Image (tube, rainbow, N blue to C red):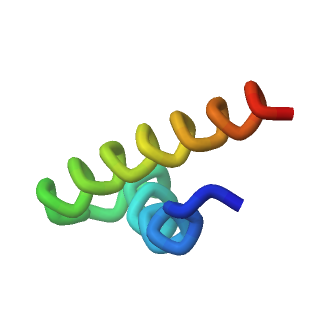
Amino acid sequence: MPASTDEMLRALRIMNEASHGVDVDPDAAKRAVEVGTVFLTELRAMDTHN
């Protein structure tokens, strides 16, 4: 599992709320995107090592 998995799971809550029309804090939304980017980078790195 990528190191950012726990943080990604928390960010998913924010992303889910936003996708369902809930007003989310702009800073929380920005952080969720940042976490998602890190998570995807870590996943890609894991894929290249296999």
Relative depth, front residue between 48 and 20: 48
Q: Is residue 39 above or below residue 22?
A: above
42 w.r.t. 25: above or below: above
Viewer-proximal residue, 49 or 29? 49
Horizontal relation, residue 23 to residue 5: left or right: left
* Furthest residue in direction top, as rendered: 48
In the image, what residue occupies the spot 52% across and 35% down?
Answer: 41
Of residue 2 and residue 31, the one placed in the foreground of this image is 2
Q: Quadrant of residue 3?
A: bottom right
State the residue at coordinates (71%, 39%): 46
Q: Is residue 11 above or below residue 6?
A: above
Q: Position of residue 21 (x, y in %)?
A: 38, 55
Q: Residue 34, percent across and down?
A: 31, 45
Q: Quadrant of the C terminus?
A: top right
Q: Which percent across, then down, holds residue 22? A: 34, 63
Q: Give the image location of residue 38, x and y in percent.
A: 43, 44
Marker count (numbered):
0
Query: Which quadrant of the figure contains the N terminus?
Result: bottom right
Position of 18 compared to 29: left or right? right
Q: Please tell me which residue lies in front, 10 or 16.
A: 10
Left or right of 24 in this view: 50: right
Residue ID at (62%, 56%): 2
Which residue is most to the right?
A: 50
